[in-house]
Image (cartoon, helix red, strand yellow):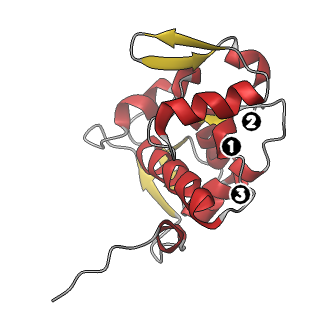
Amino acid sequence: MTYKKKSWVEKMADKKNMPKILKLQKDFPCYGPVAKMGAKAGDNVVLVNPKEVEKIMMKVPRGKLTTIHEICKKLAKNYKVQGCCTLTTGIFIMTAANAAKETGNKNPYWRTLKADGFLNEKYPGGQETHKKLLEKEGYKIIKRGKKYQVANFDKYLIKS
């Protein structure tokens, strides 16, 4: 039997079992980051479709940035729950970026950063390409060990 690897666009297709509202549990892989954003065990959290994450990413204008945390806050607010799974959201951010590269769609994915303003090594071309795209828009990038971060990223954030 031959296995055909799904394209990024195919991975962007809506998941039939999502969105899904769950009670946050301490054994969830995303418990730590979700708890840091204020949710507690037993609170409702949402797992969304990749298209919902992409839609938020598409609305980030030139001169502004967002992070996985801001996206999660917006999604939680939209669903009137206390949190959003950062693990699935992070996967969907990376999937949307690669689908944009694959199709040439207009998603300015490089304006979406990881937590604390760090660049995403899983974007097309890795951190180096992410860095170049941000510098092209005028952002100052600083090196932090093996990672890169947008200097003063929080002053450019679109708040949820």
Coordinates of residue 53 in the picture (x, y in percent):
62, 54
Mark 2 → mark 1, Cα distance in angstroms: 5 Å
Please state which amino acid type lies under the numbered disc 1: Lys
Coordinates of residue 18 in the picture (x, y in percent):
49, 68
Badge 1 density bin: few <14, some 14–19, many ≥20, Cα 10 Å? some
Label 3: state its secondary structure: helix
- State the mark number for residue 74: 1
Asked whether disc 2 touches disc 1, contact meaning CB atoms under 8 Å apart, the reply is yes
Please name the residue that numbered disc 3 is placed on: 55
Please name the residue that numbered disc 2 is placed on: 160
Mark 1 → mark 3, Cα distance in angstroms: 12 Å
Badge 3 density bin: few <14, some 14–19, many ≥20, Cα 10 Å? few
Coordinates of residue 81 in the picture (x, y in percent):
59, 47
Q: Residue furthest right?
A: 62
Please state which amino acid type lies under the numbered disc 3: Lys
Ranked by sequence position, the earlier of labels 3 and 2 is: 3
| Residue 132 appears left or right of 13 | right
- Please name the residue shown 74% across and 52% down the image: 58
- The residue nearer to you, when weighing 76 against 132, is 132
The answer to whether residue 76 is visible is: yes
- Please name the residue shown 30% across and 41% down the image: 29
Label 2: state its secondary structure: loop
| Residue 16 appears left or right of 135 | left
